[in-house]
Image (spheres, coloured by chain):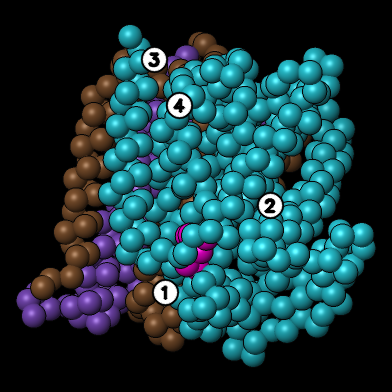
Amino acid sequence: MVNWPLEIVRAVLLTAAVFTFMAVVAAMFGVLLERKVGGWIQSRLGPKHVGPQGLLQTVADTIKLLQKEHIEPRAADRAIFNTAPLVVAVAGLMSWVVIPFGTLGDRVLVVRDLNIGVVFFAAMASLTVVGILAGGFASNNKYALLGGLRSASQMISYELPLAMALIAVAMEAGTLSTVGIVEAQAGWFGSFAFRQFPAFVIFLIAATAEVNRVPFDLPEAESELVAGYFSEYTGMRFALFQLGEYGEMFAMAAMATTLFLGGWKGPVLPGVVWFLLKMYLIVFLLMWVRWTYPRYRLDQLLNLSWKVLLPAGLVWILITGYRVTF
Amino acid sequence: MTLGLTHFLVLSTLLFCLGLFAMLTRRNAVAILMGVELMLNAANINLVAFNKYVAPGALNGQVFALVVITLAACEAGVGLALVMSAYRNLETVHVDEINVMKW
Amino acid sequence: MGQLAAFIILSVVTLVSAVVVVASQNIVRSALSLIPTLLGIAGVYILLQAEYVAGIQVLIYAGAITVLILFVIMLTEHGTGARFRQVNEQVLPGTIAVAVLAALLMAVFFGTAWPRAAGTLPQYTATSIGTTFLTSAILVFIVTSFVLLVALMGAIVIARRER
């Protein structure tokens, strides 16, 4: 019999720990890294003045956002308007429940090793779009609504290739549990980045589209739609959208690490260090792409998903099935 | 009182009746589709509950629940395509205003 | 005991948001409250040891079908939820019919002694579901795949603008 009070306390503590970790590491450090990498690629310096080398810039930004007035547009649907950022933030952070960070002794550091881990991850990634669509609708602003609709069509389209990549990996590993998938990879050439290379590429492209980053940032294209679905959001609610977005982006990078790069495995250094190294490698890749490529058009974006990635994913699943069976 | 089959059956009955009510009273075709989704979900709860409490030896209930979810996705896709088509041709999505056989 | 409490909480969430789905005069609100309903049902599946079905429920129902519904509402309602009258003249007959049906179903459910076959659910159901789909339920699986394909093509053909 499960000890319910103990379970609930444990769940609350773990959630608080993971959310704090995410808020600090992903959102704060992530924003700083984004600006520093952007500055480096464009031969600028990036933030420099707050703290040593601009390290405290995000802290200052967060304090500024916390102090700001929270403005609700008069014609907005208030209940939905206020709930939407929470949905995005919670769904973005919930993806972290199934991600194994490393090992401590012979225990695996993971909030919950669900036996449907990969399905859970895909489900949480797909819930984000609901918050975005609701926020876009409730703002009662045509740019926000257009951003929300764009994001819905984009995220629904790219969920399918993402799921194809996940299915191919789960087939080869023979399990849906994330810990099981990490344990199925051994050594450099045993990692799924080599054995499942097409799935890796499909996953990276689809993940970039899922988290609305350049070259797939149509939902928030600031030169066309002001800021898309969060045009009307101010203060902490805006920060929650950003937190959800960065949380989701880091979750995608962590999932790519778990599924394809062998998770916490690596020589000499402890597991957590390897995990963070690999995760930041993927994050850096995403940032590199962001500051290098221009934005896609909506029809090109949908064509890429439905006419290239989805057929490629299906063919790769067939090949994987053949390899696993025979 | 422990959790038994009847609890789940009562829940699914209430959900089914709410879905049926939406189907009977709503004018908007999309709202009627939402009622259908509620009814399908009620049926799914029954399938999974019977699987656990009446025939736990096999997984046929869960398998059929998955089939129902797949068919619900099909139904939503085709139904919403019909709604869009009706809106484009007749400029309404209210089923009591869609009353001409041919335009 | 804990399970019963969990069931009651999940049922309340499910039913309250289902009532909002059915009764709200704002169509966007009723579509959005479909999401807590479906998530509550996913929780009920977890109580019934069907965690794979629960995952698929969240992925397909809450993540895809609801978004599709919201998408169509926003394209057809001029971006607002509350411009039109949402219910027809059948509220009273509908209520009576639904209440009678509920009473009948409850009577049947409480009056029947359900048999109980031997056996236990497997601990890890995803693999067993796959095995069932590819052995004893293979016909269902193939027919469902065809229905999915036909529905895909049908949706594209119907929704495409005629030139």
Looking at marks 3 and 2 on the same chain, the residue that comes earlier in the sequence is marked by 2
Amino acid type indicated by mark 2: Gly
Do the residues at pointers 1 and 4 share their chain?
Answer: no
Answer yes or no: is residue A170 visible: no
2 and 4 marks in contact (CB < 8 Å):
no
Q: Which residues are magenta?
A: A213-219
Mostly what secondary structure, the magenta segment? loop
Could you tell me which residue is drawn at 30 percent across and 56 percent down?
Answer: A303
Viewer-side residue, C149 vs A261: A261
3 and 2 marks in contact (CB < 8 Å):
no
Kindly report the distance in space between the C-alpha atoms of the residues bearing marks 1 and 2: 28 Å
Kindly report the distance in space between the C-alpha atoms of the residues bearing marks 1 and 4: 39 Å
Could you tell me which residue is drawn at 40 percent across and 71 percent down?
Answer: C73
Q: Nearer the viewer, mark 1 or mark 4?
A: 4
Q: Which mark is residue A247?
A: 2
Kindly report the distance in space between the C-alpha atoms of the residues bearing marks 3 and 4: 12 Å
Do the residues at pointers 3 and 4 share their chain?
Answer: yes
Q: Which mark is residue A196?
A: 4
Amino acid type indicated by mark 4: Gln
Instruction: Determine which residue is flagged by label 1.
Output: C74
